[in-house]
Image: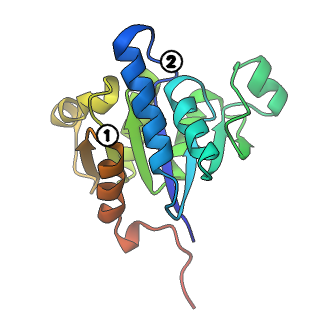
Amino acid sequence: MKITIGVMGSASDGGEGLPGHTLREKASALGRSLAGRDIVLITGATTGIVYLVGKSAQVSGVFHVGVSPATSQGEHVARYQLPTDACDLIVYTGFGLKGRNVVLVRSCEIVIFIAGAMGSLNEFSIAHDEGKVIGCLTGTGGVADEADYILQKFSTETGTNVIKNHHPEQLLDACLTALRPDDRMLPPQP
């Protein structure tokens, strides 16, 4: 069974200028680095930096599942104004953005953050509470760079392993290494 890796973060594209360009390059590199691994990518089927990761991964041959807040493709596009072209499969939860976040995080064995604001903070707290392996692509801003502060101020022990690295490939390697057999969502063997 393939490992499920969720990528969560900024739904904006990073803006204009060098900081935005660098963030977009890191997002594309993260997506490409998922290729050639025995994984399925899961995202919130959203826009911005997460879209770039998903599209880069999909183009590189990674199977990409999007988890939508909407009840249907029509609502996904019209109400939430979210794209459909970066995903191979979209699951329509009908749970809205916050409800979608719970389904999204629980569907992943590893959760990686790139940048991210309040919605990502919600996903980070869910991943922490669920004891997930969490990767933070540092140097991208937002939740990914503030994990130490968040954990220092608000953390309780949940068994979560938070890994930080500025290089996408190294971050993925460290997260995959940290995934314990009991973290895997495999059915019991007879």
Q: Is residue 77 above or below residue 126?
A: above
- Res 127 quadrant in image: top left
Q: Residue at x 37, y 23 (%)?
A: 22
The span from disc 2 to disc 1 (Cα, nearest Å) is 17 Å
- Res 99 quadrant in image: top right
Is 104 placed left or right of 9 in the picture? right
The residue wearing badge 2 is 12
Q: Residue at x 52, y 65 (%)?
A: 38
User: What x and y, as percent, mark residue 179?
Assistant: 35, 64
Q: Is residue 63 above or below residue 144?
A: below
Determine the residue located farthest toward the left in the rendered image: 152
Q: Is residue 62 above or below residue 31?
A: below
Q: Is residue 148 above or below residue 60?
A: above
Q: Given the image, on which type of amino acid does mark 2 rest?
A: Ser
Which quadrant is the C terminus positioned in? bottom right
| Foreground residue among 132 and 38 | 38
The residue wearing badge 1 is 136
Q: Residue at x 78, y 33 (%)?
A: 71
Is 117 placed left or right of 147 in the picture? right
Q: Residue at x 45, y 11 (%)?
A: 15
Determine the residue located farthest toward the top in the rendered image: 16
Q: Disc 2 on helix, strand or loop?
A: loop
User: Would residue 58 be visible to someone looking at this image?
Assistant: yes
User: What x and y, as percent, mark residue 63?
Assistant: 64, 53
Is 159 placed left or right of 49 in the picture? left
User: What x and y, as percent, mark residue 84?
Assistant: 73, 32
Q: Given the image, on which type of amino acid does mark 1 rest?
A: Cys
